[in-house]
């Protein structure tokens, strides 16, 4: 009922509520459904120790697996991942431009990780550190509301800030916060976004610049 203001969560980390209009959310949901079908399908990532992530992931441009990027999904079916479409690159640049037009001109995302959270999925505290670039990370949320825990670059513990990310919200982190630990300890049941085509679960589209050739 009340507008949620833009918020600087930490130096270089900004939360922008309702940045994505419902039309663009619907477009992204439809695109994510296509990407989830392949050439590399949506999958639960297996960790080096044998654990399995509760979140399901599909990648564009580069395939992420702990703790590296490859062009082919050797841990799934060996296929080359789908290309990162130019319109999604442009959306990422527009997100960065919201905060810093100069930084947006230099931002060249070449991979997207699309994570799907069902009601039971969680994401432990981690760093996005497989990239060889210090460019910002752009995170777009669609569907169910979650608690996004944004910490510090030194470790998984406090200090951290819990932020509620609602469908359409944008979160960008770079600069001093680029390698901050972050995670999703909770997804709220019954908070999906039917107007965007999401009757259950949460989609998170994360755009990154790998720095790889």
Image (spheres, rainbow, N blue to C red):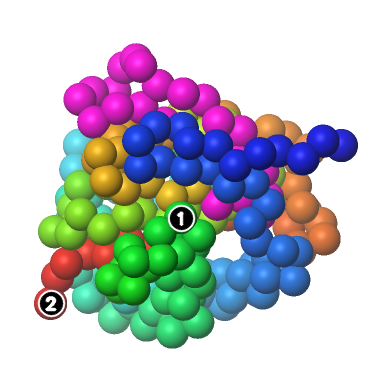
Residue sitting at 44 percent across and 83 percent down?
85
The answer to whether residue 183 is above or below residue 59 is above
In-image side of 75 versus 101 (left or right): left
Mark 2, secondary structure of its residue = loop
Mark 1 — residue? 99
Please rate how many residues cluster around mark 1, counting C-alpha atoms within 10 Å: few if below 14, some from 14 to 19, many from 20: some
Closer to the chain start, of discs 1 and 2, is 1
Q: Nearer the viewer, mark 1 or mark 2?
A: 1
Q: Please tell me whether the stretch drawn in magenta is mainly helix, strand or loop.
A: loop
Which stretch is magenta? 150-170
Please tell me how many numbered marks the rendered image carries: 2
In-image side of 210 versus 17 (left or right): left
- Quadrant holding the C terminus: bottom left
Between residues 127 and 118, which one lies in front from this camera angle?
127
Mark 2 — residue? 213
Residue sitting at 26 percent across and 58 percent down?
135
């Amino acid at each position: 009922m009340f507008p949620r203001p833009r918020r600087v969560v930490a130096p270089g980390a900004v939360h922008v509520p309702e940045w994505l209009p419902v039309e663009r959310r619907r477009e992204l949901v439809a695109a994510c459904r296509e990407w989830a079908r392949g050439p590399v399908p949506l999958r639960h990532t297996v960790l080096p120790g044998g654990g399995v992530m509760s979140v399901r992931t599909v990648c564009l441009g580069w395939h992420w697996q702990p703790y590296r990027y490859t062009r082919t999904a050797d841990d799934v079916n060996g296929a080359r991942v789908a290309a990162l479409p130019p319109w999604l690159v442009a959306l990422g640049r527009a997100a960065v431009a919201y905060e810093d037009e100069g930084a947006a001109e230099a931002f060249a995302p070449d991979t997207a990780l699309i994570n799907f959270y069902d009601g039971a999925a969680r994401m432990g505290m981690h760093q996005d550190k497989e990239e060889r670039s210090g460019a910002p990370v752009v995170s777009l949320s669609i569907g169910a509301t979650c608690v996004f825990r944004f910490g510090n670059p030194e470790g998984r513990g406090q200090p951290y800030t819990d932020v509620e990310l609602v469908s359409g919200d944008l979160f960008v982190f770079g600069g001093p916060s680029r390698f901050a630990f972050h995670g999703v300890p909770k997804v709220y049941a019954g908070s999906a976004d039917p107007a965007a085509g999401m009757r259950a679960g949460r989609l998170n589209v994360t755009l990154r610049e790998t720095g790889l050739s």
